[in-house]
Structure formats: C-alpha cells, structure tokens
Amino acid sequence: MKERIFKNWKTTLTGILMLGAGLALVGLGKATLTEYVMFAPVCFALIFVKDPSFKQ
C-alpha cells in the first residue's frame, strides 16, 4: 500500500491538494460540508490510483 502511494506520487499529490482545496472552500463558505463529503471520495480514490502512463 505504501509503495503504491509513494511510487505514484503525481496522483497522490493531486488527491491531497484537492482535499485541501475542498476544505479551504468549505472554510471560506464557498462550498457546504455536504458538498465536500460528496467530493472527498474522489480525492481519496486519486491517492491510491496508479499514475497514467503515456508511453507509446
């Protein structure tokens, strides 16, 4: 599990940044907590997904 998170650092970083941005929007009042709870599983999924490979 740790290897997948650290080896695929691009999608992991994207998921973490999206979680943080969502919390910031809730804190600023631009989004509701309900909207964030519906958005968070997508961010958590990104943390564990493999990076896409564009090799031909």
Image: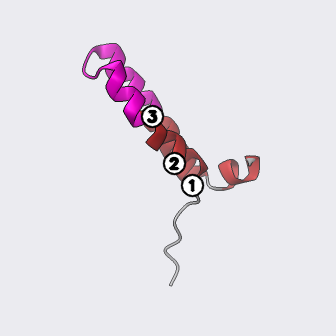
**Which of 32 and 50 lies nearest the eye of the viewer?**
32
Q: Are marks 1 and 3 in contact (CB under 8 Å)?
A: no
Q: Which mark is residue 49?
A: 1
Task: Say if mark 2 contacts mark 1, CB within 8 Å.
Answer: yes
Q: Is residue 41 magenta?
A: no
Q: Real-space Cα distance between discs 2 and 1?
A: 5 Å
13 left or right of 5 in image: left
Q: Residues within 10 Å of mark 2 (few under 14, many from 20)?
A: many
- Vertically, is 31 above or below 39? above
Left or right: where does residue 32 sit relative to residue 45? left
Residue drawn at x 48%, y 45% as measured from the top left: 14
Residue at 51% across / 48% down in the picture? 46
Point out residue 37 in the picture as x, y percentages from the top left corner.
Answer: 41, 28
Magenta portion: prevailing SS class: helix
Query: What is the crowding at mark 3: few (fewer than 14 residues within 10 Å), some, or many (at least 20)?
Result: some
Q: Amino acid at mark 2?
A: Leu
Q: Classify 10 Å Cα crowding around label 1: few (below 14), some (14-19), many (20 and above).
A: some
Residue 40 bears which disc, if any?
A: 3
Q: Residue furthest bottom?
A: 56
Point out the stretch of residues depicted in magenta. Answer: 19-39
Could you tell whether 3 is left or right of 54 in the image?
right
Residue 28 included in the magenta stretch of the image? yes
Q: Amino acid type of disc 3?
A: Ala
Q: Amino acid at mark 1?
A: Val
Sequence-wise first label, 2 or 3: 3
- Residue 43 drawn at (x, y percent): 47, 40
For residue 34, what is the image quadrant?
top left
SS state under label 2: helix
Question: Reading the chain from its start, which is encountered first: label 1 or label 3?
Answer: 3
Residue carrying label 2? 46
Q: Nearer the viewer, residue 34 or 23?
A: 34
Residue 17 location (% of width, % of height): 47, 36
